[in-house]
Image (cartoon, rainbow, N blue to C red):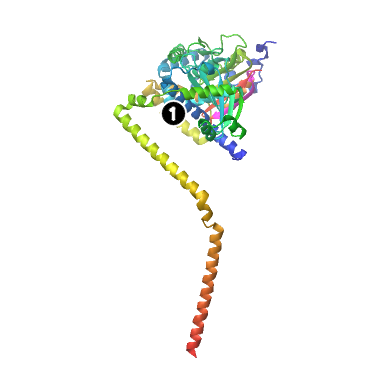
Amino acid sequence: MSSSDQIPQENDLPKSQQTPMNIDGNSTTHFGYKTIEKDDKISMVAGVFHSVAKQYDVMNDLMSFGIHRLWKRFTIDASGVRPGNKVLDLAGGTGDLTAKFSQLVGREGKVVLADINSSMLNVGRDKLRDKGLVQNIEYVQANAEYLPFEENTFDIVTIAFGLRNVTDKDKALRSIYSVLKPGGRLLVLEFSKPEHELLNKAYDFYSFNILPKMGEIVAKDGDSYQYLAESIRMHPDQETLKSMMDNAGFEQTSFKNLTGGVVALHKGYKF
Amino acid sequence: MSIFTKLAASKIANELLLPQAVTAALELIINKALALNNNTSVSFSAVAQKTLTLKLAELSFPLSFSVNSSSKPVVVIVSTLAEQSDCSIQTSLYTLKKLKDNQSLTQLIKQDELDVSGDLKVAQQFANIAQSLEIDWQSELANHLGDVPTHKLLQFGNKVTKSFLTKSKQLEADLTEYVVHEKRLVVSKSQIKAFNQRTKEIANDVSAISKRVDKLIADYASK
């Protein structure tokens, strides 16, 4: 039996296990708070990231007060990466995770930085080359729903702050499952739901009042950061994402809340 | 420290992402030092792709050091690679200082102050690199501050260090004197307690005699 035979298909799932996105007629999806045609989402998200690519790192530091670096370090620590591993940094953007993985997998290992957006990929490639990281990194422009790799290729797949922008998350998770080697693991670092109500309220105020203004001043694009805030709220919460990973075939799935649940790291294995 | 306190400390540290903050800061400092190294004969090839894990008693998480020397040597530190390490050392900061002072490695292992597992050569290679780094802090600082301020700053720094060392030596000597000689002569807490009790009793006796004398005088006067 091939690994793809073992993956439960979306239509095979009982209704209770299907995510809202699977149920809503399959022709529409969310773009922030807007409901749009699925076919339009890729180009709309692309528009956002083409617009913010050059200021992406600066804005990340500003918006998270630099904490995104610690969240990413936590992801590296949790990945259990070792020399010789093959790593796919999906929606890798400007290559923060790729840089660290490249140093850890060494000459025998390989890191593939994949992103659907050419602008983000170009910024990432320039940044990594400037750091002298060239020998074990490949760059691929790819859609997470249709990964252009053979089955059982990677030891580790990470997707940091990217899954919420994917049109069909279930399809992307199944695609990731397929390219992982048996024993391989997926790590999803993504904004999530804060654990405490008070933090939730403060976070809402910050996201909808301060963040778009920051985007307007620094990246000259308030709308993209309004989308960011909205897309975070529309993203599945911790338990929902965990069950989506289960449905995609991942085993021993778990999540760890970081900074009170503002961000969560989900982890699942393929056996 | 009890196991429960250790677990609680570890949980709090993880919640605050302390391991990640510590490894990020250490990585920054070490790589900055490597970039400033003037000793071109330092070779990193022996430790390339090797991992040294340090488990310090003072920290609730391990520190795993690995070197990537593909373009320029870079040290990468993560906090959870303990099982995959080429060499693992369990010790404390205090013992590390003893090692720096050339105290015998085997002696420290015998005294259970140091626990080494894996390839000891890897640890020695890392230590050799650290010792052979040559960094001209003075000229590096002068590039940022200028020659005169740097000279003044270092002069002040040396003065403070010297004074601190003299004071700490004096304190150490005073403490030794106290522990060896004076502590035996000092009155103990129980002795003070007994003395206070006895003083109280005498005061009571004196007060009783005084009252009796007053009464006798009064009786005598009335006769």
The range drawn in magenta is A247-257
User: Which quadrant, please, contains the N terminus of chain A?
Assistant: top right
Residue A76 location (% of width, % of height): 54, 22
User: Which quadrant, please, contains the C terminus of chain A?
Assistant: top right
Magenta residues, dominant SS class = strand
Residue A223 location (% of width, % of height): 41, 21
Q: Residue at x 50, y 36 (%)?
A: A198
Extreme residue toward the left, this view: B148
Residue that label 1 marks = A65
Residue B147 location (% of width, % of height): 30, 27
Does the magenta-highlighted stretch encompass residue A250?
yes
Up/down of A165 relative to B167, above or below: above
Q: Which residue is drawn at 43% across and 44% down?
A: B170
Up/down of B209 relative to A117, above or below: below
Is residue B194 visible from the viewing direction of this image? yes
Relative depth, front residue between A29 and A130? A130
Does the magenta-highlighted stretch encompass residue B34?
no
Dot 1 alpha-carbon crowd within 10 angstroms: few under 14, some 14 to 19, many 20 or more: few
